[in-house]
Image (spheres, helix red, strand yellow):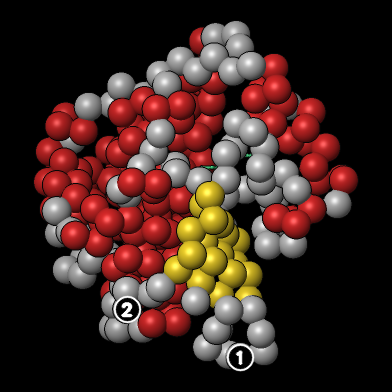
């Protein structure tokens, strides 16, 4: 059994979708970011970086008791390797899949996150920051659009954890007013993956992104701000 420490955001849905695809049983342990549920010493034992998601595998393939994994890309790779699925067996294709997985966690995710911060959350609108990150996000979208014009999936012919890493970002795209239909190859890929039953199961009911995380201009209470971006968020690292 696997514990999934989860918040219903694109990063969390990467893992719920992968677990559904792999048919691995899991217990969903939900957190509320606005309440700062993730800023506890107990969660730091699972993810020393205090971000969501993370897993604890109570039956790791190498034995030795429960194994915690943090960083969504590392979790996806761990689950793929545990099961021998969702990563191509062919070494060349596998390398391509890992490249696009790394691209998501190193480029698309962080740049999208910064764009979302300055457009949606920042208390003051800073034109330079908004311009810098929205333009970089648009550039990354064009990189993905080009790739999906030459291959069915990001890794090539096979659906993989690289696709699962990128796909849930569609709700972030919605909050940023990015119209996916303007990227025809990406839109084709988006619809293809959306039709997968496991993808539906991985993002429904208590795994669906709630409206409070979909605000196009989020207004946070002082306490919510402190938990997400301010003093309480930063103090957690030194408190444990
Ligand atoms: N690189 C991390 C990013 C995780 C991340 O930023 N998660 C967000 C939720 S989508 C979070 O935990 N935010 C709360 C915070 O920053 O304190 C990953 O891929 O797992």
Instruction: Report helix, strand or loop for mark 1.
Output: loop
Q: Is residue 7 above or below residue 156?
A: above
- Percent coordinates x, y for residue 22 in the rendering: 32, 73
Number of residues whose C-alpha sits closer than 10 Å to that of mark 2, classed few (under 14), some (14–19) or many (20 or more) = some
Write down the residue under mark 2: 85
Q: Quick check: 83 above or below 22? A: below
Residue 106 appearing in the image: no
Q: Is residue 154 above or below residue 231?
A: below
Asked whether mark 2 and ligand 1 are closer than 8 Å, the reply comes as no
Q: Are marks 2 and 1 in contact (CB under 8 Å)?
A: no
Residue 50, image x and y in percent?
Answer: 68, 49
Mark 1 packing: few (<14 Cα in 10 Å), some, or many (20+)? few
Q: Which mark is residue 63?
A: 1
Which residue does the image show at 64% across and 79% down from the upper left?
66
What residue sits 72% from the left and 44% below the top? 39
Q: Is residue 51 visible?
A: yes
In this picture, residue 62 sits left or right of residue 8: right
Q: Position of residue 154 (x, y in %)?
A: 26, 58
Q: Residue, x 32% and y 65% (percent of image)?
A: 20
Who is closer to the viewer here, 153 or 167?
167
Q: Residue furthest right?
A: 239
């Amino acid at each position: 059994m696997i514990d999934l420490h989860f918040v219903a955001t694109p990063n969390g849905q990467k893992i719920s979708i992968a677990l559904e695809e792999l048919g691995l049983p899991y217990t969903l342990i939900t957190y509320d970011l606005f309440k700062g549920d993730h800023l506890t010493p107990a969660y730091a034992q699972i993810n020393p970086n205090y971000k969501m998601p993370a897993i604890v595998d109570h039956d790791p393939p190498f034995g030795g008791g429960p194994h915690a994994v943090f960083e969504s890309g590392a979790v996806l790779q761990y689950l793929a390797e545990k099961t021998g699925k969702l990563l191509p067996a062919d070494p060349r294709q596998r390398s391509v899949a890992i490249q696009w997985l790394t691209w998501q966690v190193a480029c698309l995710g962080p740049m999208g996150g910064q764009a979302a911060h300055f457009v949606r959350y920042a208390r003051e609108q800073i034109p330079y920051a908004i311009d810098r990150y929205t333009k970089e996000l648009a550039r990354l979208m064009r990189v993905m659009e080009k790739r999906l014009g030459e291959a069915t999936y990001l890794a090539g012919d096979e659906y993989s954890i690289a696709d699962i890493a990128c796909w849930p970002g569609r709700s972030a795209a919605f909050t940023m007013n990015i119209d996916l239909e303007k990227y025809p190859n990406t839109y084709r890929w988006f619809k293809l993956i959306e039709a997968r039953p496991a993808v539906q199961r991985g993002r429904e009911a208590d795994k669906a992104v709630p409206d409070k995380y979909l605000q196009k201009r989020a207004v946070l209470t002082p306490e919510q701000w402190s938990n997400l971006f301010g003093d309480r968020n930063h103090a957690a690292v030194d408190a444990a």
